[in-house]
Image (spheres, rainbow, N blue to C red):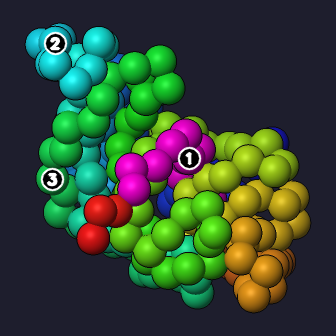
């Protein structure tokens, strides 16, 4: 498994865990909250709905997008076995994860500090956010037009979460 490599990234993860447990005050939008469950049943879902924060910073399925403090909005998603571990959501920017994931899709992310080789995750390399498949020593795009990104080329690297699903863009 790959984990946090830089001290600032480790601090963000520690603060996020403290926030989840209620031990730390809310700091910035970088600290990822636990979803709240709306137990109201809807006609479209046997399990009801839940809300998660969709951060207003697209994650790159391409060359990288700078991640900084950001504004987030609550979105409502179906609450079911597959989405229950969703902690936050990010919008995809680019086409490097096609044909499966497309520009504008929203990925559902479980807040984790590591992923297994072959798993899809949200990664931060020198402050730039990426949605890629973890390859051990590189990040891999699904689109064959993009070369793997070697992790040794960056001063800092962290995993911000495991991608557990997607909401397809309707536009």
* Residue at x 16% of width, y 19% of height: 43
Left or right of 39? Residue 55 is: right
* Residue at x 43% of width, y 29% of height: 83
Left or right of 31? Residue 143 is: right
How many angstroms separate mark 1 from mark 2 (CA)? 26 Å
In the foreground, 13 or 76: 76
Residue at disc 3, secondary structure: strand
In the foreground, 38 or 30: 38
Mark seen at residue 41: 2
Mark seen at residue 163: 1
> Considering only order in the chain, which callout, 2 or 1, is on the residue closer to the N terminus?
2
Left or right of 127? Residue 154 is: right
Which image quarter: residue 100? Answer: bottom right
**Residue ID for mark 3:** 73
> Considering only order in the chain, which callout, 2 or 3, is on the residue closer to the N terminus?
2
> Considering only order in the chain, which callout, 3 or 1, is on the residue closer to the N terminus?
3
Dominant secondary-structure state across the stretch colored magenta: strand
Question: Which residues, given as a range, are shown in magenta?
Answer: 158-168
* Residue at x 50% of width, y 69% of height: 102
Q: Is residue 167 magenta?
A: yes
Looking at the figure, which quarter contains the C terminus? bottom left
């Amino acid at each position: 498994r790959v984990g946090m490599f830089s001290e600032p990234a480790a601090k963000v993860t520690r603060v996020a865990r403290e926030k989840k447990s209620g031990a730390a005050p809310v700091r910035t939008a970088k600290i990822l909250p636990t979803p709240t469950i709306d137990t109201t049943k809807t006609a479209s879902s046997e399990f009801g709905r839940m809300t998660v924060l969709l951060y207003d910073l697209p994650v790159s399925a391409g060359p990288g997008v700078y991640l900084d403090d950001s504004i987030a909005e609550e979105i409502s998603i179906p609450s079911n076995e597959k989405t229950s571990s969703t902690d936050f959501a990010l919008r995809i920017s680019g086409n490097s994860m096609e044909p499966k994931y497309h520009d504008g899709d929203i990925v559902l992310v479980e807040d984790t500090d590591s992923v297994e080789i072959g798993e899809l995750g949200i990664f931060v390399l020198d402050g730039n956010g990426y949605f890629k498949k973890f390859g051990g020593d590189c990040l891999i795009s699904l689109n064959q037009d993009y070369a793997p990104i070697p992790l040794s080329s960056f001063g800092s690297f962290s995993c911000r979460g495991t991608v557990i699903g997607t909401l397809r863009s309707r536009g």
